[in-house]
Image (cartoon, grey):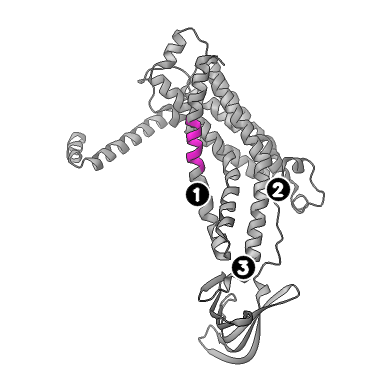
């Protein structure tokens, strides 16, 4: 690349990288908060939590990568336009390829990274994540029964142990079981222990009583010398890991096991994932073309109703929704499979047409005016909140 092309490339790369880090942090935090109960409820270590958090990163990268690219390109070109750099480059006799080439190289690198992560790194991370989750659930019985803690095992089932006794026994056991409709059972026992019998686990309670409460409010009390509470009713049957099509590598999707449960259950669901993998990487290129169509030409500040980045991201959100919609439909209706490829191809072709015809990608005038008024109102509101003394002057001026 020429010197000016390298300058444009590295400038867009820095902004795209910063946008990617911010988007990853936001999406990653959301995913972690949704899964933190898996670790806390099962008593896993901090190392397990950190490993689970790290494994979630590859699942987020392919989603946010295209948006980081469109932000980086549109912001770079808008800033260069405001500094008259685009006008200077055009006046110096440089072709449009001087602007297009570094941006398309950046988008191609992002697409290659997205393809690699989506088809090899993410499936491996997903399988490891499911293994950790299965292990956490399988270890639930040994962790929920903790001294002095009132723990929720599952919906409607709570266990509390007052103290740990020698030889693995427990003292002061309380179990509240309201899983069955219109029936509440409360178990009290002075002592007890967890025992393994084959593939089943039991909580043996000694010297206690059961309180049975019916919908009418009647309570019956039964005393017992010993009682075996079946823990296997709610515990997982083992550390079996359920692998979904999205957890498979690209090679497996091309040549799946004929006995694969999901392939036998719903072939369209299985193959929709394959076609999604083969098209997902292209959105970085499509978004780059949309950004170039929206902000790739030099123009005066008066020509734009709203910032080109707002226009580019608004169109990109619509395109991404189209992709998700047809991909979800393809899971049940095979006729939607060609549309998985049609969405990025047609939108890329539309953006290429605008670039070749030297036309600018803009929202409809009515939409642009509404967005411009909306942002203007937000700025006025923020200014009024920052300087309360200006609020009355703004109201008098509007009146």
Q: Earlier in the sequence, mark 2 or mark 3?
A: 3
At x 46% / y 11%, what residue is drawn? 90
SS at circle 2:
helix
Q: Which residues are magenta?
A: 15-24
Q: Earlier in the sequence, mark 1 or mark 2?
A: 1
Q: Position of residue 160 (x, y in %)?
A: 54, 77
In the image, is residue 222 above or below residue 184?
below
In the image, is residue 107 above or below residue 327?
above
Task: Judge whether residue 336 can be spotted in this image.
Answer: no
Q: Quadrant of residue 130?
A: bottom right
Disc number for residue 245: 2
**Is there a contact, CB below 8 Å, between mark 1 and mark 2?**
no
**How far apart are labels 1 and 3 at the CA level?**
25 Å
Residue ID for mark 1: 29
SS at circle 3:
helix
Q: Earlier in the sequence, mark 1 or mark 3?
A: 1
Q: Position of residue 23 (x, y in %)?
A: 49, 40
Q: Quadrant of residue 284?
A: top right
Q: Position of residue 363 (x, y in %)?
A: 45, 28
At x 52% / y 23%, what residue is drawn? 9
Residue ID for mark 3: 140
Disc number for residue 201: none
């Amino acid at each position: 690349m020429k010197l000016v092309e390298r300058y444009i490339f590295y400038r867009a790369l820095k902004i795209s990288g910063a946008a990617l880090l911010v988007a990853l942090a936001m999406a990653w935090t959301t995913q972690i908060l949704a899964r933190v109960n898996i670790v806390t409820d099962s008593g896993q270590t901090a190392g397990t939590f950190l490993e689970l958090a790290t494994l979630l990163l590859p699942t987020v990268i392919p989603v946010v990568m295209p948006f980081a690219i469109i932000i980086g390109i549109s912001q770079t070109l808008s800033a260069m336009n405001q500094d008259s750099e685009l006008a200077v480059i055009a006046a110096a006799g440089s072709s449009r390829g001087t602007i297009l080439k570094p941006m398309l190289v950046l988008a191609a690198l992002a697409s290659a990274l997205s393809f690699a992560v989506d088809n090899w790194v993410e499936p491996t991370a997903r399988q490891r994540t499911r293994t950790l989750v299965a292990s956490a659930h399988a270890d639930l019985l040994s962790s929920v029964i903790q001294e002095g803690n009132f723990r929720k095992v599952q919906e409607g089932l709570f266990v509390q142990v007052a103290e740990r006794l020698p030889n693995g026994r427990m003292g002061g056991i309380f179990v509240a079981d309201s899983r069955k409709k219109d029936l509440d059972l409360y178990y009290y026992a002075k002592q007890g222990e967890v025992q393994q019998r084959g593939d089943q686990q039991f909580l043996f309670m000694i010297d206690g009583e059961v309180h049975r409460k019916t919908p009418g409010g009647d309570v019956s009390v039964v005393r017992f010398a010993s009682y075996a509470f079946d823990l296997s009713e709610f515990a997982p049957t083992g550390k079996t890991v359920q692998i979904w099509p999205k957890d498979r590598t690209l090679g497996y999707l091309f040549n799946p096991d004929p006995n694969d449960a999901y392939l036998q259950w719903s072939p369209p669901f299985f193959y929709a994932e394959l076609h999604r993998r083969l098209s997902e990487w292209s959105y970085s290129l499509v978004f780059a073309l949309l950004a170039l169509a929206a902000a790739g030409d030099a123009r005066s500040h008066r020509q734009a109703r709203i910032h080109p980045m707002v226009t580019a991201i608004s169109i990109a959100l619509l395109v991404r929704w189209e992709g998700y919609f047809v991909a979800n439909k393809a899971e049940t209706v095979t006729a939607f499979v060609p549309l998985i490829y049609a969405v990025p191809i047609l939108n890329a072709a539309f953006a290429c047409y605008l670039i070749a015809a030297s036309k600018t990608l803009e929202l409809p005038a009515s939409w642009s005016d509404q967005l411009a008024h909306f942002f203007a109102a937000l700025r006025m509101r923020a200014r009024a909140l920052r300087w309360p003394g200006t609020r009355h002057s703004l109201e008098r001026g509007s009146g």
